[in-house]
Image: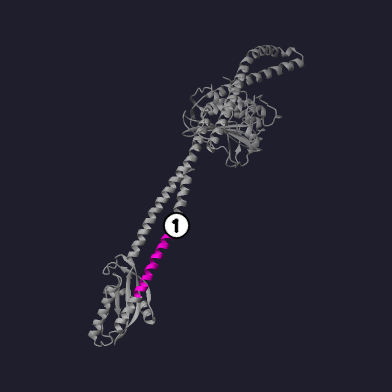
Amino acid sequence: MQLRVVGTALVVGAVTVAALGAYLSSTMRDGLFEQRLEQINVESANSIQQAQSLFTASLSKTKDSELQTLLLDVHNTLRTSGSPDRKVFLMRPEGATSRLNDVSTDNQLTSLVSDELRDAVLESDGRELQSVAIPRDPSDPSSPVDPGVLVGSKVQVPTVGTYELYFLYSLAPEQETLSFLQGTLALGAAFMVGILVLITWVVTRQAVQPVRNAASVAERLADGHLNERLPVKGHDELATLARSFNEMAESLQLQIGRMEELSLLQRRFVSDVSHELRTPLTTIRMAGEVLHASRDEFDPASKRSAELLQTQLDRFEDLLADLLEISRFDAGAAQLDAERRDVRDVVNAAVDLAAPLAERKGVWMSVHFPDEPAIADVDPRRVERIVRNLVVNAIEHAEERPVEVTVAQDRHAVAIVVRDHGVGMTEDEAMHVFDRFWRADPARARTTGGTGLGLAISLEDAHLHGGWLEVWGRPGRGAAFRLTLPLRAGIHLASSPLPLVPEEPTRVRGLGPATGPVGQVEDPAEGTTSPSALPVLPDEPLVAGRQGALRAASEHTADEERP
Protein backbone atom coordinates (compact mmCIF):
# COMPACT_ATOMS: atom_id res chain seq x y z
CA MET A 1 0.00 0.00 0.00
CA GLN A 2 2.81 2.40 0.82
CA LEU A 3 4.37 1.81 -2.59
CA ARG A 4 1.04 2.44 -4.31
CA VAL A 5 0.44 5.66 -2.37
CA VAL A 6 3.96 6.94 -3.03
CA GLY A 7 3.70 5.96 -6.69
CA THR A 8 0.36 7.73 -7.02
CA ALA A 9 1.74 10.85 -5.34
CA LEU A 10 4.76 10.74 -7.64
CA VAL A 11 2.62 10.48 -10.77
CA VAL A 12 0.15 13.15 -9.67
CA GLY A 13 2.93 15.46 -8.52
CA ALA A 14 4.93 14.97 -11.72
CA VAL A 15 1.87 15.64 -13.91
CA THR A 16 0.89 18.69 -11.89
CA VAL A 17 4.38 20.15 -11.86
CA ALA A 18 4.80 19.40 -15.57
CA ALA A 19 1.53 21.16 -16.40
CA LEU A 20 2.43 24.14 -14.22
CA GLY A 21 5.93 24.26 -15.69
CA ALA A 22 4.56 24.16 -19.22
CA TYR A 23 2.18 27.02 -18.43
CA LEU A 24 4.88 29.14 -16.80
CA SER A 25 7.36 28.41 -19.59
CA SER A 26 4.81 29.36 -22.25
CA THR A 27 3.92 32.52 -20.36
CA MET A 28 7.56 33.55 -19.97
CA ARG A 29 8.29 32.77 -23.61
CA ASP A 30 5.38 34.85 -24.84
CA GLY A 31 6.25 37.66 -22.46
CA LEU A 32 9.89 37.82 -23.55
CA PHE A 33 8.92 37.68 -27.22
CA GLU A 34 6.24 40.37 -26.95
CA GLN A 35 8.54 42.64 -24.99
CA ARG A 36 11.37 42.24 -27.48
CA LEU A 37 8.99 42.59 -30.43
CA GLU A 38 7.71 45.91 -29.06
CA GLN A 39 11.28 47.17 -28.74
CA ILE A 40 12.00 46.04 -32.32
CA ASN A 41 8.93 47.84 -33.64
CA VAL A 42 9.87 51.12 -31.96
CA GLU A 43 13.52 50.89 -32.93
CA SER A 44 12.86 49.87 -36.55
CA ALA A 45 10.27 52.64 -37.01
CA ASN A 46 12.75 55.25 -35.79
CA SER A 47 15.51 53.81 -37.98
CA ILE A 48 13.34 53.80 -41.09
CA GLN A 49 12.33 57.41 -40.47
CA GLN A 50 15.96 58.33 -39.90
CA ALA A 51 17.03 56.66 -43.16
CA GLN A 52 14.33 58.38 -45.13
CA SER A 53 15.37 61.75 -43.65
CA LEU A 54 18.97 61.17 -44.67
CA PHE A 55 17.94 60.29 -48.22
CA THR A 56 15.63 63.32 -48.46
CA ALA A 57 18.39 65.64 -47.27
CA SER A 58 20.66 64.45 -50.12
CA LEU A 59 18.48 65.34 -53.13
CA SER A 60 21.35 67.27 -54.74
CA LYS A 61 23.36 64.14 -55.25
CA THR A 62 22.76 62.71 -58.69
CA LYS A 63 25.90 60.89 -59.69
CA ASP A 64 26.15 57.16 -59.22
CA SER A 65 29.31 57.48 -57.16
CA GLU A 66 27.68 60.00 -54.90
CA LEU A 67 24.56 57.88 -54.54
CA GLN A 68 26.61 54.74 -53.77
CA THR A 69 28.47 56.69 -51.11
CA LEU A 70 25.13 57.91 -49.77
CA LEU A 71 23.90 54.31 -49.46
CA LEU A 72 27.04 53.34 -47.57
CA ASP A 73 26.77 56.33 -45.25
CA VAL A 74 23.12 55.63 -44.45
CA HIS A 75 23.92 51.94 -43.89
CA ASN A 76 26.74 52.77 -41.47
CA THR A 77 24.58 55.29 -39.66
CA LEU A 78 21.73 52.79 -39.24
CA ARG A 79 24.09 49.98 -38.16
CA THR A 80 25.66 52.03 -35.39
CA SER A 81 22.56 53.80 -34.19
CA GLY A 82 20.50 50.71 -33.30
CA SER A 83 21.02 47.46 -31.43
CA PRO A 84 24.64 46.25 -31.49
CA ASP A 85 23.79 42.93 -33.12
CA ARG A 86 21.34 44.35 -35.64
CA LYS A 87 22.04 43.66 -39.29
CA VAL A 88 21.03 46.19 -41.99
CA PHE A 89 20.29 45.44 -45.64
CA LEU A 90 19.67 48.04 -48.39
CA MET A 91 18.49 46.22 -51.49
CA ARG A 92 17.17 47.43 -54.81
CA PRO A 93 13.94 45.83 -55.96
CA GLU A 94 14.17 42.91 -58.33
CA GLY A 95 14.04 44.06 -61.94
CA ALA A 96 15.25 47.62 -61.15
CA THR A 97 17.65 49.23 -63.68
CA SER A 98 19.73 51.01 -61.08
CA ARG A 99 23.48 50.62 -61.40
CA LEU A 100 24.01 50.95 -57.65
CA ASN A 101 25.09 47.93 -55.60
CA ASP A 102 23.17 46.50 -52.62
CA VAL A 103 24.62 47.32 -49.22
CA SER A 104 24.40 44.80 -46.39
CA THR A 105 26.05 44.15 -43.05
CA ASP A 106 26.57 40.45 -43.88
CA ASN A 107 26.12 39.29 -47.43
CA GLN A 108 25.80 35.65 -46.29
CA LEU A 109 22.61 36.50 -44.41
CA THR A 110 20.82 38.22 -47.29
CA SER A 111 19.36 34.84 -48.22
CA LEU A 112 17.19 35.09 -45.10
CA VAL A 113 15.15 37.77 -46.84
CA SER A 114 12.54 35.64 -48.58
CA ASP A 115 10.76 36.47 -51.79
CA GLU A 116 7.44 36.51 -49.96
CA LEU A 117 8.72 39.18 -47.55
CA ARG A 118 10.11 41.30 -50.40
CA ASP A 119 6.82 41.15 -52.28
CA ALA A 120 4.92 42.07 -49.14
CA VAL A 121 7.26 45.05 -48.50
CA LEU A 122 6.85 46.38 -52.04
CA GLU A 123 3.08 46.06 -51.87
CA SER A 124 2.77 47.64 -48.40
CA ASP A 125 3.19 51.23 -47.31
CA GLY A 126 4.26 50.25 -43.80
CA ARG A 127 6.55 47.79 -42.07
CA GLU A 128 6.45 44.00 -42.54
CA LEU A 129 7.83 41.47 -40.03
CA GLN A 130 8.90 37.85 -40.48
CA SER A 131 10.38 35.30 -38.04
CA VAL A 132 13.58 33.66 -39.26
CA ALA A 133 16.21 31.20 -38.04
CA ILE A 134 19.68 32.81 -38.02
CA PRO A 135 22.58 30.34 -38.44
CA ARG A 136 25.43 30.95 -36.05
CA ASP A 137 27.91 30.07 -38.80
CA PRO A 138 26.42 31.11 -42.17
CA SER A 139 29.12 29.19 -44.02
CA ASP A 140 28.10 25.88 -42.35
CA PRO A 141 24.58 24.72 -43.31
CA SER A 142 24.48 22.30 -40.35
CA SER A 143 25.40 24.86 -37.70
CA PRO A 144 22.95 25.67 -34.86
CA VAL A 145 20.49 28.47 -35.39
CA ASP A 146 19.10 31.28 -33.24
CA PRO A 147 15.63 32.77 -33.51
CA GLY A 148 15.36 36.17 -35.16
CA VAL A 149 13.02 38.74 -36.68
CA LEU A 150 13.28 40.51 -40.04
CA VAL A 151 11.67 43.97 -40.38
CA GLY A 152 11.29 45.39 -43.88
CA SER A 153 10.09 48.66 -45.35
CA LYS A 154 10.41 50.83 -48.48
CA VAL A 155 12.58 53.98 -48.67
CA GLN A 156 12.95 56.50 -51.47
CA VAL A 157 16.52 57.07 -52.71
CA PRO A 158 17.14 60.32 -54.69
CA THR A 159 17.29 59.91 -58.45
CA VAL A 160 17.20 56.10 -58.12
CA GLY A 161 13.70 55.62 -56.68
CA THR A 162 12.38 52.90 -54.35
CA TYR A 163 14.79 50.79 -52.33
CA GLU A 164 14.11 48.02 -49.79
CA LEU A 165 15.41 48.50 -46.24
CA TYR A 166 15.62 45.42 -43.93
CA PHE A 167 16.69 45.08 -40.29
CA LEU A 168 17.66 41.63 -38.92
CA TYR A 169 17.28 41.32 -35.12
CA SER A 170 18.60 38.27 -33.25
CA LEU A 171 16.57 36.87 -30.36
CA ALA A 172 19.46 34.78 -29.02
CA PRO A 173 19.69 36.75 -25.71
CA GLU A 174 15.98 36.22 -25.10
CA GLN A 175 16.38 32.53 -25.98
CA GLU A 176 19.22 32.20 -23.47
CA THR A 177 17.12 33.91 -20.84
CA LEU A 178 14.20 31.61 -21.58
CA SER A 179 16.47 28.51 -21.43
CA PHE A 180 17.87 29.64 -18.10
CA LEU A 181 14.39 30.18 -16.68
CA GLN A 182 13.19 26.81 -18.01
CA GLY A 183 16.21 25.06 -16.50
CA THR A 184 15.54 26.74 -13.17
CA LEU A 185 11.90 25.68 -13.36
CA ALA A 186 12.93 22.10 -14.16
CA LEU A 187 15.26 21.95 -11.17
CA GLY A 188 12.61 23.46 -8.95
CA ALA A 189 10.02 21.00 -10.25
CA ALA A 190 12.30 18.02 -9.62
CA PHE A 191 13.00 19.32 -6.11
CA MET A 192 9.29 19.81 -5.43
CA VAL A 193 8.42 16.33 -6.70
CA GLY A 194 11.18 14.85 -4.54
CA ILE A 195 9.89 16.73 -1.49
CA LEU A 196 6.35 15.57 -2.27
CA VAL A 197 7.45 11.92 -2.54
CA LEU A 198 9.44 12.18 0.69
CA ILE A 199 6.54 13.71 2.57
CA THR A 200 4.13 11.11 1.18
CA TRP A 201 6.50 8.28 2.11
CA VAL A 202 6.90 9.57 5.67
CA VAL A 203 3.17 10.10 6.15
CA THR A 204 2.16 6.76 4.66
CA ARG A 205 4.85 4.97 6.66
CA GLN A 206 3.31 6.29 9.86
CA ALA A 207 -0.02 4.82 8.79
CA VAL A 208 1.21 1.63 7.10
CA GLN A 209 3.81 0.45 9.62
CA PRO A 210 1.23 -0.35 12.32
CA VAL A 211 -0.78 -2.26 9.72
CA ARG A 212 2.35 -4.24 8.77
CA ASN A 213 2.98 -4.99 12.43
CA ALA A 214 -0.63 -6.16 12.79
CA ALA A 215 -0.28 -8.39 9.71
CA SER A 216 2.97 -9.88 11.05
CA VAL A 217 1.41 -10.59 14.44
CA ALA A 218 -1.66 -12.07 12.75
CA GLU A 219 0.56 -14.43 10.72
CA ARG A 220 2.36 -15.54 13.87
CA LEU A 221 -1.00 -16.09 15.56
CA ALA A 222 -2.06 -18.20 12.58
CA ASP A 223 1.15 -20.22 12.96
CA GLY A 224 0.18 -21.07 16.51
CA HIS A 225 2.07 -18.40 18.49
CA LEU A 226 -0.98 -17.37 20.49
CA ASN A 227 0.97 -15.17 22.92
CA GLU A 228 1.85 -12.59 20.25
CA ARG A 229 0.45 -9.10 20.85
CA LEU A 230 0.69 -5.66 19.24
CA PRO A 231 2.51 -2.85 21.07
CA VAL A 232 0.13 -0.05 22.11
CA LYS A 233 1.45 3.54 21.96
CA GLY A 234 -0.60 6.67 22.51
CA HIS A 235 -4.33 7.15 22.29
CA ASP A 236 -4.94 7.71 18.58
CA GLU A 237 -6.95 5.56 16.17
CA LEU A 238 -4.03 3.17 15.56
CA ALA A 239 -3.60 2.67 19.29
CA THR A 240 -7.31 1.89 19.54
CA LEU A 241 -6.91 -0.61 16.70
CA ALA A 242 -3.95 -2.25 18.49
CA ARG A 243 -5.92 -2.58 21.73
CA SER A 244 -8.91 -4.08 19.89
CA PHE A 245 -6.59 -6.49 18.07
CA ASN A 246 -4.97 -7.60 21.33
CA GLU A 247 -8.38 -8.14 22.92
CA MET A 248 -9.42 -10.24 19.93
CA ALA A 249 -6.18 -12.26 20.14
CA GLU A 250 -6.73 -12.82 23.85
CA SER A 251 -10.26 -14.04 23.21
CA LEU A 252 -9.07 -16.33 20.41
CA GLN A 253 -6.35 -17.75 22.63
CA LEU A 254 -8.89 -18.56 25.33
CA GLN A 255 -11.33 -20.13 22.88
CA ILE A 256 -8.64 -22.16 21.11
CA GLY A 257 -7.29 -23.32 24.46
CA ARG A 258 -10.73 -24.49 25.49
CA MET A 259 -11.27 -26.24 22.17
CA GLU A 260 -7.89 -27.98 22.44
CA GLU A 261 -8.73 -29.15 25.93
CA LEU A 262 -12.11 -30.44 24.78
CA SER A 263 -10.54 -32.14 21.76
CA LEU A 264 -7.89 -33.74 23.94
CA LEU A 265 -10.51 -34.93 26.38
CA GLN A 266 -12.60 -36.28 23.51
CA ARG A 267 -9.71 -38.19 21.96
CA ARG A 268 -8.67 -39.53 25.35
CA PHE A 269 -12.23 -40.53 26.07
CA VAL A 270 -12.58 -42.39 22.77
CA SER A 271 -9.24 -44.13 23.30
CA ASP A 272 -9.98 -45.00 26.90
CA VAL A 273 -13.46 -46.25 26.14
CA SER A 274 -12.16 -48.35 23.25
CA HIS A 275 -9.55 -49.94 25.46
CA GLU A 276 -11.85 -50.42 28.42
CA LEU A 277 -14.52 -52.04 26.28
CA ARG A 278 -12.13 -54.70 25.06
CA THR A 279 -12.20 -56.63 28.36
CA PRO A 280 -16.00 -56.99 28.64
CA LEU A 281 -16.18 -57.52 24.88
CA THR A 282 -13.78 -60.45 25.18
CA THR A 283 -15.93 -62.01 27.91
CA ILE A 284 -19.12 -61.45 25.94
CA ARG A 285 -17.49 -62.88 22.81
CA MET A 286 -16.45 -66.03 24.67
CA ALA A 287 -20.01 -66.50 25.92
CA GLY A 288 -21.41 -65.70 22.49
CA GLU A 289 -19.14 -68.22 20.79
CA VAL A 290 -20.34 -70.91 23.22
CA LEU A 291 -23.94 -70.05 22.44
CA HIS A 292 -23.21 -69.85 18.72
CA ALA A 293 -21.52 -73.26 18.73
CA SER A 294 -24.57 -74.80 20.47
CA ARG A 295 -27.21 -72.97 18.40
CA ASP A 296 -28.40 -76.15 16.68
CA GLU A 297 -29.66 -77.43 20.05
CA PHE A 298 -31.84 -74.32 20.63
CA ASP A 299 -35.33 -73.61 19.49
CA PRO A 300 -35.55 -71.48 16.31
CA ALA A 301 -35.96 -68.16 18.16
CA SER A 302 -32.97 -68.80 20.44
CA LYS A 303 -30.92 -70.05 17.51
CA ARG A 304 -31.60 -66.86 15.56
CA SER A 305 -30.72 -64.76 18.60
CA ALA A 306 -27.37 -66.55 18.95
CA GLU A 307 -26.56 -65.89 15.29
CA LEU A 308 -27.50 -62.19 15.60
CA LEU A 309 -25.42 -61.92 18.73
CA GLN A 310 -22.36 -63.32 16.94
CA THR A 311 -22.84 -60.95 13.97
CA GLN A 312 -23.21 -57.85 16.13
CA LEU A 313 -20.22 -58.86 18.27
CA ASP A 314 -18.12 -58.99 15.09
CA ARG A 315 -19.33 -55.54 14.09
CA PHE A 316 -18.75 -54.18 17.60
CA GLU A 317 -15.19 -55.46 17.55
CA ASP A 318 -14.60 -53.86 14.16
CA LEU A 319 -15.97 -50.56 15.45
CA LEU A 320 -13.64 -50.62 18.44
CA ALA A 321 -10.68 -51.31 16.17
CA ASP A 322 -11.63 -48.41 13.90
CA LEU A 323 -12.04 -46.07 16.85
CA LEU A 324 -8.59 -47.01 18.11
CA GLU A 325 -7.13 -46.40 14.65
CA ILE A 326 -8.82 -42.99 14.38
CA SER A 327 -7.56 -42.05 17.84
CA ARG A 328 -3.99 -42.88 16.70
CA PHE A 329 -4.35 -40.54 13.73
CA ASP A 330 -5.83 -37.79 15.90
CA ALA A 331 -3.00 -38.13 18.39
CA GLY A 332 -0.36 -38.16 15.62
CA ALA A 333 0.84 -41.57 16.76
CA ALA A 334 0.19 -43.46 13.52
CA GLN A 335 3.35 -45.08 12.15
CA LEU A 336 4.13 -45.95 8.53
CA ASP A 337 5.91 -49.30 8.15
CA ALA A 338 7.04 -48.75 4.56
CA GLU A 339 8.78 -51.43 2.51
CA ARG A 340 9.59 -52.03 -1.15
CA ARG A 341 6.61 -53.93 -2.51
CA ASP A 342 4.95 -54.62 -5.82
CA VAL A 343 1.67 -52.72 -5.57
CA ARG A 344 0.08 -55.22 -7.94
CA ASP A 345 0.38 -57.93 -5.29
CA VAL A 346 -1.19 -55.68 -2.65
CA VAL A 347 -4.11 -54.80 -4.94
CA ASN A 348 -4.60 -58.42 -5.93
CA ALA A 349 -4.80 -59.46 -2.26
CA ALA A 350 -7.42 -56.76 -1.55
CA VAL A 351 -9.48 -57.77 -4.58
CA ASP A 352 -9.36 -61.45 -3.56
CA LEU A 353 -10.78 -60.54 -0.15
CA ALA A 354 -13.64 -58.64 -1.81
CA ALA A 355 -14.36 -61.38 -4.37
CA PRO A 356 -16.90 -63.30 -2.20
CA LEU A 357 -18.94 -60.12 -1.74
CA ALA A 358 -18.88 -59.48 -5.50
CA GLU A 359 -20.13 -63.04 -6.04
CA ARG A 360 -23.02 -62.54 -3.63
CA LYS A 361 -23.94 -59.18 -5.18
CA GLY A 362 -23.66 -60.47 -8.77
CA VAL A 363 -21.04 -57.85 -9.71
CA TRP A 364 -18.47 -58.52 -12.45
CA MET A 365 -14.97 -57.36 -11.58
CA SER A 366 -12.02 -56.69 -13.88
CA VAL A 367 -8.48 -55.85 -12.79
CA HIS A 368 -5.95 -54.25 -15.15
CA PHE A 369 -2.27 -54.39 -14.18
CA PRO A 370 0.76 -52.94 -15.99
CA ASP A 371 3.17 -55.37 -17.61
CA GLU A 372 6.09 -54.17 -15.48
CA PRO A 373 6.20 -54.50 -11.67
CA ALA A 374 4.86 -51.43 -9.85
CA ILE A 375 7.47 -51.27 -7.07
CA ALA A 376 6.95 -48.51 -4.47
CA ASP A 377 7.75 -47.69 -0.84
CA VAL A 378 4.40 -48.49 0.79
CA ASP A 379 2.92 -49.92 3.96
CA PRO A 380 1.24 -53.05 2.50
CA ARG A 381 -1.27 -53.32 5.32
CA ARG A 382 -2.51 -49.74 4.93
CA VAL A 383 -2.59 -49.79 1.11
CA GLU A 384 -4.46 -53.07 1.12
CA ARG A 385 -6.96 -51.58 3.57
CA ILE A 386 -7.49 -48.55 1.31
CA VAL A 387 -8.02 -50.64 -1.82
CA ARG A 388 -10.29 -53.08 -0.01
CA ASN A 389 -12.46 -50.24 1.28
CA LEU A 390 -12.74 -48.71 -2.18
CA VAL A 391 -13.49 -52.01 -3.91
CA VAL A 392 -16.15 -52.98 -1.36
CA ASN A 393 -17.70 -49.52 -1.69
CA ALA A 394 -17.82 -49.93 -5.47
CA ILE A 395 -19.43 -53.40 -5.16
CA GLU A 396 -22.00 -52.09 -2.66
CA HIS A 397 -23.13 -49.35 -5.06
CA ALA A 398 -22.53 -51.04 -8.43
CA GLU A 399 -26.10 -52.40 -8.67
CA GLU A 400 -24.89 -55.51 -10.54
CA ARG A 401 -22.88 -53.43 -12.99
CA PRO A 402 -19.15 -53.92 -13.64
CA VAL A 403 -16.42 -52.75 -11.28
CA GLU A 404 -12.99 -51.98 -12.71
CA VAL A 405 -9.68 -51.78 -10.84
CA THR A 406 -6.76 -50.29 -12.78
CA VAL A 407 -3.12 -49.92 -11.71
CA ALA A 408 -0.51 -47.81 -13.55
CA GLN A 409 2.77 -46.09 -12.77
CA ASP A 410 5.19 -43.52 -14.13
CA ARG A 411 8.62 -42.29 -13.02
CA HIS A 412 7.33 -40.67 -9.84
CA ALA A 413 4.07 -42.28 -8.74
CA VAL A 414 1.80 -45.31 -8.85
CA ALA A 415 -1.97 -44.91 -9.16
CA ILE A 416 -4.93 -47.19 -8.42
CA VAL A 417 -8.36 -46.36 -9.85
CA VAL A 418 -11.50 -48.15 -8.67
CA ARG A 419 -14.44 -47.46 -10.98
CA ASP A 420 -18.09 -48.49 -10.67
CA HIS A 421 -21.14 -47.68 -12.82
CA GLY A 422 -23.79 -47.71 -10.13
CA VAL A 423 -25.86 -45.13 -8.26
CA GLY A 424 -23.16 -42.44 -8.12
CA MET A 425 -23.65 -39.44 -5.86
CA THR A 426 -24.93 -35.87 -5.71
CA GLU A 427 -22.65 -32.92 -5.06
CA ASP A 428 -24.07 -32.51 -1.56
CA GLU A 429 -23.36 -36.15 -0.78
CA ALA A 430 -19.87 -35.78 -2.20
CA MET A 431 -19.16 -32.97 0.27
CA HIS A 432 -19.68 -35.28 3.26
CA VAL A 433 -18.88 -38.77 2.03
CA PHE A 434 -15.63 -39.00 3.99
CA ASP A 435 -17.03 -37.53 7.18
CA ARG A 436 -16.90 -39.95 10.07
CA PHE A 437 -20.06 -42.04 10.52
CA TRP A 438 -21.78 -40.26 7.61
CA ARG A 439 -24.11 -42.22 5.33
CA ALA A 440 -25.49 -41.02 1.99
CA ASP A 441 -28.76 -42.90 2.45
CA PRO A 442 -29.56 -43.86 6.06
CA ALA A 443 -32.27 -46.23 4.82
CA ARG A 444 -29.84 -48.16 2.62
CA ALA A 445 -28.88 -51.58 3.97
CA ARG A 446 -25.24 -52.03 4.95
CA THR A 447 -24.46 -55.44 3.49
CA THR A 448 -20.95 -55.63 4.81
CA GLY A 449 -21.76 -54.28 8.26
CA GLY A 450 -19.25 -51.44 7.93
CA THR A 451 -18.50 -49.06 10.77
CA GLY A 452 -18.77 -45.76 8.86
CA LEU A 453 -15.08 -44.98 9.50
CA GLY A 454 -13.43 -46.92 6.68
CA LEU A 455 -13.14 -44.11 4.14
CA ALA A 456 -11.97 -41.61 6.76
CA ILE A 457 -9.23 -44.05 7.77
CA SER A 458 -8.38 -44.62 4.09
CA LEU A 459 -7.88 -40.91 3.61
CA GLU A 460 -5.55 -40.73 6.61
CA ASP A 461 -3.62 -43.75 5.32
CA ALA A 462 -3.17 -42.06 1.93
CA HIS A 463 -1.93 -38.84 3.52
CA LEU A 464 0.41 -40.81 5.76
CA HIS A 465 2.08 -42.07 2.57
CA GLY A 466 2.30 -38.53 1.19
CA GLY A 467 -0.24 -39.44 -1.48
CA TRP A 468 -3.57 -38.27 -2.84
CA LEU A 469 -7.05 -39.70 -2.59
CA GLU A 470 -9.27 -38.22 -5.31
CA VAL A 471 -12.86 -39.06 -6.13
CA TRP A 472 -15.25 -38.31 -8.99
CA GLY A 473 -18.89 -39.25 -9.37
CA ARG A 474 -22.25 -38.26 -10.79
CA PRO A 475 -25.76 -39.50 -9.93
CA GLY A 476 -26.65 -42.49 -12.09
CA ARG A 477 -23.18 -42.56 -13.68
CA GLY A 478 -21.23 -44.25 -10.93
CA ALA A 479 -18.08 -43.12 -9.21
CA ALA A 480 -14.32 -43.41 -9.52
CA PHE A 481 -11.75 -43.39 -6.73
CA ARG A 482 -8.11 -42.66 -7.54
CA LEU A 483 -5.32 -43.37 -5.07
CA THR A 484 -1.93 -41.90 -6.07
CA LEU A 485 1.19 -42.79 -4.06
CA PRO A 486 4.81 -41.68 -4.56
CA LEU A 487 7.23 -44.41 -5.65
CA ARG A 488 9.80 -43.29 -3.08
CA ALA A 489 9.39 -41.54 0.25
CA GLY A 490 9.92 -37.78 0.01
CA ILE A 491 8.68 -37.36 -3.57
CA HIS A 492 6.17 -34.52 -3.92
CA LEU A 493 3.42 -35.54 -6.32
CA ALA A 494 2.61 -33.24 -9.24
CA SER A 495 0.43 -35.52 -11.38
CA SER A 496 -1.09 -38.99 -11.48
CA PRO A 497 -0.34 -41.78 -13.98
CA LEU A 498 -4.07 -42.47 -14.49
CA PRO A 499 -6.96 -40.18 -15.43
CA LEU A 500 -9.83 -40.04 -13.01
CA VAL A 501 -12.66 -39.32 -15.48
CA PRO A 502 -13.26 -41.63 -18.47
CA GLU A 503 -12.80 -39.78 -21.75
CA GLU A 504 -15.10 -41.90 -23.94
CA PRO A 505 -17.61 -44.73 -23.62
CA THR A 506 -16.14 -48.20 -23.07
CA ARG A 507 -17.48 -51.71 -22.75
CA VAL A 508 -16.23 -53.66 -19.76
CA ARG A 509 -16.23 -57.42 -19.74
CA GLY A 510 -15.10 -59.29 -16.68
CA LEU A 511 -15.45 -62.77 -15.27
CA GLY A 512 -17.31 -62.88 -11.99
CA PRO A 513 -15.88 -64.57 -8.94
CA ALA A 514 -18.17 -67.55 -9.37
CA THR A 515 -16.79 -68.54 -12.78
CA GLY A 516 -13.09 -67.80 -12.63
CA PRO A 517 -10.31 -65.63 -11.24
CA VAL A 518 -10.89 -61.91 -10.96
CA GLY A 519 -9.62 -59.92 -13.92
CA GLN A 520 -9.94 -62.67 -16.54
CA VAL A 521 -11.75 -61.42 -19.67
CA GLU A 522 -14.20 -63.67 -21.47
CA ASP A 523 -16.39 -63.34 -24.57
CA PRO A 524 -20.00 -62.45 -23.65
CA ALA A 525 -21.20 -64.56 -26.55
CA GLU A 526 -20.19 -67.67 -24.60
CA GLY A 527 -22.61 -66.80 -21.85
CA THR A 528 -20.12 -66.10 -19.09
CA THR A 529 -20.56 -62.34 -18.94
CA SER A 530 -22.87 -59.58 -20.06
CA PRO A 531 -21.29 -56.42 -21.48
CA SER A 532 -22.52 -53.13 -20.04
CA ALA A 533 -22.42 -49.94 -22.09
CA LEU A 534 -20.88 -47.12 -20.07
CA PRO A 535 -21.85 -43.45 -20.64
CA VAL A 536 -19.54 -40.60 -21.57
CA LEU A 537 -18.40 -38.78 -18.41
CA PRO A 538 -16.99 -35.37 -19.37
CA ASP A 539 -17.34 -33.72 -15.98
CA GLU A 540 -14.34 -32.64 -13.94
CA PRO A 541 -13.25 -34.63 -10.87
CA LEU A 542 -13.84 -33.56 -7.33
CA VAL A 543 -10.65 -33.72 -5.29
CA ALA A 544 -10.49 -35.13 -1.80
CA GLY A 545 -9.49 -32.67 0.89
CA ARG A 546 -7.82 -33.03 4.26
CA GLN A 547 -10.61 -31.73 6.49
CA GLY A 548 -13.52 -33.85 5.31
CA ALA A 549 -14.44 -31.92 2.17
CA LEU A 550 -13.98 -35.07 0.12
CA ARG A 551 -15.93 -36.39 -2.83
CA ALA A 552 -16.95 -40.05 -3.12
CA ALA A 553 -19.74 -42.31 -4.24
CA SER A 554 -20.48 -43.77 -0.79
CA GLU A 555 -18.99 -44.26 2.65
CA HIS A 556 -19.94 -47.94 2.82
CA THR A 557 -16.82 -49.94 3.63
CA ALA A 558 -15.73 -53.51 4.17
CA ASP A 559 -14.45 -55.20 7.31
CA GLU A 560 -10.83 -54.08 7.57
CA GLU A 561 -7.68 -55.81 8.72
CA ARG A 562 -6.75 -54.40 12.15
CA PRO A 563 -3.23 -53.74 13.49
Q: Is residue 10 visible?
A: yes
In the image, residue 323 lies at what x, y percent? 61, 21
Look at the image and say whether residue 31 sits in the magenta stretch: yes
At 27% across and 67% down in the image, what residue appears? 137
Q: Is residue 469 visible?
A: no
Q: Amino acid at mark 1?
A: Leu
| Vertical comparison of 113 with 14: above or below | below
Residue 181: which quarter of the image?
Answer: bottom left
Residue 470: which quarter of the image?
Answer: top right
Give the residue pinned by disc 1. Answer: 20
- Of 286 and 427, nearer the camera is 427
Which corner quadrant holds the C terminus?
Answer: top right
| Vertical comparison of 135 with 186: above or below | below
Most common SS among magenta residues: helix
At 54% across and 28% down in the image, what residue appears? 462
In the image, residue 425 lies at what x, y percent? 65, 35
| Vertical comparison of 38 with 399: above or below | below
| Vertical comparison of 310 with 392: above or below | above
- Magenta stretch: give its range: 23-44
